[in-house]
Amino acid sequence: MLIAGALTRYVSALLVAEMIVAIWKVHFVHGFFLNWRLQPGVGHGYEFNLVLISGLACLICTGPGVISLDRWLASKRHYKGLPQDDVIRKQAVPPVPGRRDEPSHRAL
């Protein structure tokens, strides 16, 4: 679902919870660092799990990208009466009295 960009924030939150459980149940007893020498009988630490958690936290904060299923669904919801970005921008800037709203009369 993350690759398609579907329900990005919810799936990321669930994966963060899964990584925390993986650290707690499997990786915590082996310490922080990964087993780079691949010694038999020695497991990996929780270093990589923390990297995954931080990446998922970034996805939770920023949301999906431009090419995602969430963005496409949000654009479809626009047609049901939600405002567009240009409408919001036009409302944010108050009109200047006495100036026409034509591109040739706008200040450079």
Image: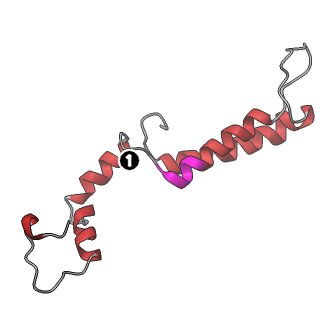
Report helix, strand or loop for mark 1: helix
Q: Which residues are magenta?
A: 58-63
Task: Residue at 60%, 44% (x, y): give it.
Answer: 56
Give the image quarter of residue 5.
top left
Where does label 1 land, which residue? Answer: 70
The answer to whether residue 104 is above or below residue 28 is below
- Is residue 84 something that shows in the picture? no
Residue drawn at 36 percent across, 44 percent down: 66
Residue pictured at 53% horizontal, 50% vertical: 10
Identify the amino acid type marked 1: Asp
Percent x, y of residue 35: 85, 22
Where residue 62 sits: x, y (%)?
50, 52
Q: Is residue 105 magenta?
A: no
Res. 27 image quadrant? top right
Look at the image and tell me whether residue 18 can be seen.
Answer: yes
Secondary structure mostly taken by the magenta-highlighted segment of the chain: helix
